[in-house]
Structure formats: structure tokens, C-alpha cells
Amino acid sequence: MSFTAPGTRTVTTAIPARLDRLPWSRWHWTIVVGLGTVWILDGLEVTVVGNIAGRLSEPGSGLAITSGQVTGIAAALYVAGACSGALFWGHLTDRFGRKKLFMITLAVYLSATALTAVSFSTWWFFLFRFLTGFGIGGEYAAINSAIDELIPAHYRGRVDLIINGSFWVGAVGGALLSIVALNTDLLPKDLGWRLTFALGVVLGLVILLVRRNVPESPRWLLIHGREQEAERVVSAIERQVEAEKGKPLPRPDAEITIHQRKSIGFATIARTVFSHYRKRAVLGFSLFIGQAFLYNAITFGFGAILTTFFDVPTGATGYYFAVIAIGNFLGPLLLGKLFDTVGRRVMISSTYLLSGLLLFGTAWLFDRGSLSAGTLTACWCAVLFFASAGASSAYLTVSEVFPMETRAMSIAFFYALGTAAGGIAGPLLFADLTNTGHVGDTVLAFRIGAALMCAAGLVAALLAVRAERRPLEDVARPLTAAAVEAEATPQRPTSGGFPGSAGRRGSWPI
């Protein structure tokens, strides 16, 4: 089967190895800021919506909507938009490039957020919650694929985890911002919640300006017949890094032969993922299902649990959520480096299992009546410290264990399936369980989330791929490279893959 396409040819290149042998530099920080900080906005917005649900349902808010509709229907529509957006934009990302799509998806996300701020009717609010999710779904596919292809293998795990975990930095801001928005001494009922969305738009525009300086992925350019452009991008990066470090870079240690192709169809993608990488597909699906249900078991009902069982005022729940969000961010921040040193299999399985077991313990204590609002929040912090690192590793896993040509679509597919199961069914299920006011129903919600998280941890213990410090081309050889081997059987390394950098040593620059 030939992958030949008009305007393309077979090339042998060291571009992937040149990117992977770069030391950490200011240029890499540009990538982190330009691509990663959008999750802060996502966390801010999602948290604000959850925290202002009670205010939106009050007379004078400007919307005829109930709290249940905000946390149930609107939340489910946001997730449905994210799932459909991931699939739609994910295919386009693999076909037309990372940069074009991460600019477009951010623009869609910001436009929908701005229009949410001027909602005048329930249907309008629902529509633009869906479209906001539609934009953010595309961000997941475009951003994660670009990050993995631009960040050196030595740092890929920790950078990916911290960037995905930065959602919770936004969640802290959203929780605190909602306290201000709910304060009617400062802002009218029909204005405060609108300004929170408007602030997100302003911050997003700043990110959009920074993102313009992020280049297209040289790996994507190379495979799609634009090797001269890929060479220019990599050479410019190398010059910048050498100028910063004040010394020449080491020689790249490997080359790879690529048979270029303009695009790859759905049939090839599906056959690759579900035939050649069946175990990895099971792994990806399990990780997304587990983390989605655990998070929904806690976050979609946390406000109702605090107000119903512990008489916490509605306006004060933001403080508790800010504490939970801090625990979430500290997990990837403090544990991230271990995913590159101790290894993927040990860390993914242990973070999933530990968070699940801790949630089982929390359910037991809650059932016994042994917890207060403060101690329950402390338990949630412990659970989510490990769960956040595990959940971030789910995105890392599906973005690095499948071939380059399917990367964005693979991220989109597993995100959509896992999030649809946990993020659409989850809010509807857990909102009912946590809003009944019965201790047993809330305990059941905790146990469901814990059981699925533990099950995913066991799957990871068996199937997780040892991708730490290995080049992407070694973890999953490009389809175009495999095609060349089948036809021409070119010389390749005796290790059976693209030589990695496992023997190289370095330290996280922070």
C-alpha cells in the first residue's frame, strides 16, 4: 500500500531528534504560555458557572433559569459541545495543521463566551454553553498534539501534566471571582455574573496575541510535504536556543525516513487505533472513563453537599472550592516530574488507585457522619491531589501512544467517548444523587466514582506504555515511516525504533 501523494516525496531527516535534544529554554516557555494558559480560562469559566448557579436562578438575575438547569442541562450541553467539537476539530487538526486550528478554536471559544455574557433567555444561555464547549473540545485536540510535538522528550510528561493541570489555577480564580460576582453590595444581580464571562474574554484575547508567536509543528510540516518550512522553523528555534545558552547544541543522534502524505482518512485512523493498537485503545478509554466519573462524583455536587448537609451559605461555597482547586493543581505540579523519572506505568496506575481508594475512605467517613465541611474538603483535596495528576496523564497518554498522523484525532476520540460517558451521564446521575438530601445517595455517588477510578488504575498497571523520555517516533512509529519500511526496507536502528534519549540526563528548569 503506497502513501505517495502528489507534491510529496520520501525524505530522511533528523528534525524530530533535533527537537528532542534541545535544552529547556525561554522558547519553550513561550509554548507553555501561548498554548497552555487557555486551560486557566477554561477552569475559570467552568467554575464560575457552577458557583453562580444559585444566583442565576434568583429573581432579578436577568435569566429565567433554575439552579438545576445550570448544573444539569447547561453542564451536559457544555460537555456535549466539547465532545462533538473535539471530533470535528480533531480531524481538521491532523489534516490542516496544529497552528491553524488552535487559533480558530480559541476564537470560537472566546466568541461563544462573550455571547454567553449577554444572555437574555434560557435558550440563548444553553446555545452558547454548547458552542463554548464546542470550541474548548477543539482546543484539547490541537493543543495537546502541538505541545507533545514541540516539547523535548525529556520534559514531555511533566510539561503536559502541568499544562493540563493548570485548569485548576483558573478554577481557584473562578471560585474567588464568583464570591465577588455574588456580592450584591458590589454588583447588581444581573451584572456580576456577566462581568465574569467578559473578564475571561479579555484574558483570552491576551493569550491569542501570545499564541500568534507559536510556530506550526515541524513534525506535522515534515509529514505533510513541507520539509523546507519545517527546516526553517527548527533552524530558527536552534539559533534562538544557542544564543540564549551561549554554546552550540549537540549533534542530533538519529534520523528517520518519512514517506510524505497530504492527509489520512478515517478508515486508516480507525484501523490503526483499533486494530494495531487495541490494548492502547482500551487503556485510553479506561483512563478517560475513570477520571470523568470520579470528578463528576465530587465537583458536580460539591455545592449542594456543603449547603445541604453542613449549612454552608451559598455565597461561601466558592472558598471551599478554591481550596479543592489548589489541591488539584498541586498534584500535577509536584508529581509531574515523577512521570518522566519513575515512569508512566507506575505513576499512572498509582495515582488512579490512590485517588479511588481515598474516595472510598471519604464515602465511609461521610456515611458515618464523621466529617464537617472543613474535613470533607480536606478529604476531597487529598483525593483530587492524586486524581488530577492521573486525569492529566490520560491526556498525555492518548497524545503520545498513537502515531503522529492520528494524534489529534486520537486525543479527540478518547476525550469524546470518555467525557460523553462520564461528563454527560455523570452530571445527570450525580446531580440527582447529591441533591436528594439523603446521605446514602451521596455515598453511592462517591462509591461509583471511586470504583471506576480504581478499575482504570488496574488497567493502567497492566497496559500503560513506558513512554517516559522516549521520542514520540519511538513510542509509536509514524504510519508514513512504516509504509516506507514495507516498500523500500531502508536502513534503521537495531533497536527497532527511533533511538530515544532515555540515557540522557537533565533537570526540570523550574
Image (cartoon, rainbow, N blue to C red):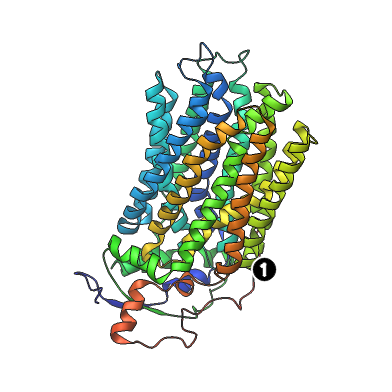
**Does 500 sit above or below residue 267?**
below
Look at 67% across and 35% down and name the residue there: 440
Is any atom of residue 264 visible in this view?
no
Is any atom of residue 120 visible in this view?
yes
Residue 448 picture location, percent across and down: 60, 45
**Does 81 sit above or below residue 61?**
below
Task: Please identify the quarter of the rendering in which residue 126 is found.
Answer: top left
Look at 29% across and 63% down and name the residue there: 267
Q: Hey, what amino acid is under mark 1?
A: Val
Q: Which of 468 and 66 is in front in this view?
A: 66
Residue 92 picture location, percent across and down: 31, 53
Secondary structure at numbered mark 1 = loop
Residue located farthest toward the top when viewing the structure as drawn = 60
Tell me if 275 is positioned left or right of 179 in this view. Answer: left
Residue 247 picture location, percent across and down: 57, 72
Task: Please identify the quarter of the rendering in which residue 437 is found.
Answer: top right
Quadrant for the C terminus, please. bottom right
Q: Nearer the viewer, residue 171 or 506?
A: 171
Q: Which of 188 and 68 is in front in this view?
A: 68
Quadrant for the N terminus, please. bottom left
Tell me if 368 is positioned left or right of 93 in this view. Answer: right
Query: Mark 1 sits on what residue?
Result: 342
